């Protein structure tokens, strides 16, 4: 028989880590404890839900973690209960361990789980909801690719890292008269490269949603050199691709729900620019620097709002929903709607138009 009141909630952080996770954990736990709830921290995301690893959280556990990067609970992007990798006879095989997840949910006597994560985490949460678990979602991803929310926490912190890196590359690029290529994360969405490049004064921004023309890129850096601007900054998303080519795949990891691991486009672009223009070119891959460190003030505030509103949804038994930023307010949307469409950069987005207006090239003559 279902309980009339919420008494025990679980909380997990799924997918890749990012700044602001601890702020959400704090935002959920502190008010939950004030309401007299038991808070169970599930260790290492959905891995802990399947393997039965959890700890009880107390006020002392979440004090002083607002500004801390990472997550005190640990995370994993290889713990999908419906796509569970195990090594059998030297080969990785995939199993469905969702029943074990449900078993632990019931054994811990949880009334709800606050699932913090991005697109992958929300897809898993939706499936678990269909199995009978009470889930409230909190949107986290540096990629900012969840359509249902104006912004995900973690994105602003990643953009800060990119813009600061471009600031630093600007001085060395101008000193040595070089083209500097910086590769960002973002997978299939170009928001990090777009916003980071705009904030950091990139001359060329290349993103997955706008396939680029090699000749336009060459012409741009050569033109800058000809008019006396003897350096250029190129900000490229890991999923960017030329008009006549594909995304650059670093490797495949069958343990992940999405096995494709992108990376390497920055090096290719740097070599092609050097070979075809004669300009000295270097590249930098920011990688996991974009995930690490302390969250920006914006992300600390957004994470706290998300966390406190998520526990309110749980208390009201509004399950199967995700908190979302709509304008300046935190609302809620169904998880099913949240994952129905990926948020990608459009040619008409104001950031694209603003970048074009100040002279940024997207490697195409169409903008």
Image (cartoon, grey):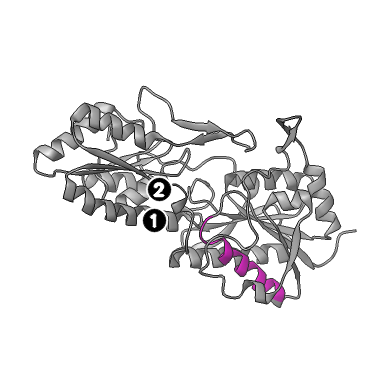
**Disc marking residue 310:** none
Closest to the observer, 320 or 117: 117
Q: Quadrant of residue 189?
A: top left
Q: Quadrant of residue 40?
A: bottom right
Q: Closer to the N terminus: mark 1 or mark 2?
A: 1
Q: From the viewer's perspective, is the residue at label 1 or at label 2 nearer?
A: 2
13 horizontally vs 240: left or right: right
Closest to the observer, 148 or 16: 16
Is disc 1 placed on a helix, strand or loop? Answer: helix
Query: Are circles 1 and 2 on residues that touch, CB within 8 Å?
Result: yes
Secondary structure mostly seen in the magenta stretch: helix
Q: Which residue is mark 2?
A: 286
Closest to the observer, 97 or 252: 252
Q: Residue furthest left?
A: 227
Residue 7 in the image: state x and y as whole percent: 79, 68
Please give the name of the residue rendered at 39% of the width and 24% of the height, measured from the top-left corner.
Answer: 245
Q: Whole-Å distance between the Cαs marked 1 and 2?
A: 9 Å
Residue 205 in the image: state x and y as whole percent: 31, 41
Range covered by the magenta-colored residues: 18-33
24 horizontally vs 345: left or right: right
Please give the name of the residue rendered at 16% of the width and 34% of the height, measured from the top-left corner.
Answer: 222
Please give the name of the residue rendered at 52% of the width and 32% of the height, measured from the top-left corner.
Answer: 251
**Quarter of the rendering occupied by the N terminus:** bottom right
Does the magenta-highlighted stretch encompass residue 21? yes
Residue 175 in the image: state x and y as whole percent: 17, 50
Could you tell me if residue 365 is visible in this image? Answer: no
Residue 355 in the image: state x and y as whole percent: 27, 46
Could you tell me if residue 162 is visible in this image? Answer: yes
Q: Which residue is mark 1?
A: 161
């Amino acid at each position: 028989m279902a309980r009339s009141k919420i008494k025990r909630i679980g909380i997990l952080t799924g997918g890749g880590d990012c700044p602001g996770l601890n702020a959400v954990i704090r935002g959920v736990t502190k008010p939950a404890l004030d309401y007299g709830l038991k808070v169970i921290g599930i260790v290492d995301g959905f891995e802990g839900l399947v393997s039965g690893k959890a700890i009880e959280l107390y006020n002392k556990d979440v004090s002083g973690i607002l500004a801390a990067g990472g997550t005190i609970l640990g995370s994993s992007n290889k713990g999908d209960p419906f796509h569970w990798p195990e090594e059998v006879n030297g080969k990785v095989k995939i199993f469905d361990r969702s029943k074990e997840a449900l078993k632990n949910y019931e054994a811990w006597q949880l009334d709800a789980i606050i699932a913090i994560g991005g697109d992958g985490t929300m897809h898993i949460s939706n499936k678990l909801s269909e199995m009978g678990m009470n889930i409230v979602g909190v949107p986290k991803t540096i990629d900012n690719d969840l359509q249902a929310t104006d912004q995900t926490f973690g994105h602003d912190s990643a953009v800060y890292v990119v813009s600061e890196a471009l600031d630093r590359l600007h001085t060395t690029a101008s000193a040595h008269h070089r083209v500097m290529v910086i590769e960002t994360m973002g997978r299939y969405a170009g928001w990090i490269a777009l916003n980071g490049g705009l904030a950091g004064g990139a001359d060329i921004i290349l993103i997955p949603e706008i396939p680029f023309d090699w000749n336009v890129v060459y012409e741009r850096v050569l033109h800058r050199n000809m008019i006396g601007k003897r350096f250029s900054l190129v900000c490229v998303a890991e999923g960017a691709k030329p008009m006549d080519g594909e995304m650059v795949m670093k490797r495949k990891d069958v343990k992940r729900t999405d096995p494709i691991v992108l990376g390497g486009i920055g090096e290719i672009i740097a070599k092609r620019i050097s070979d075809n223009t004669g300009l000295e070119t270097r590249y930098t891959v920011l990688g996991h620097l974009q995930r690490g460190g302390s969250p920006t003030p914006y992300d600390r505030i957004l994470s706290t709002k998300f966390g406190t509103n998520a526990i309110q949804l749980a208390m009201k038994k509004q399950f199967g929903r995700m908190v979302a930023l709509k304008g300046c307010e935190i609302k809620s949307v169904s998880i099913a709607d949240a994952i129905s469409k990926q948020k990608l950069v459009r040619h008409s987005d104001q950031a694209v138009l603003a970048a074009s207006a100040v002279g940024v090239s997207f490697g195409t003559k169409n903008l």
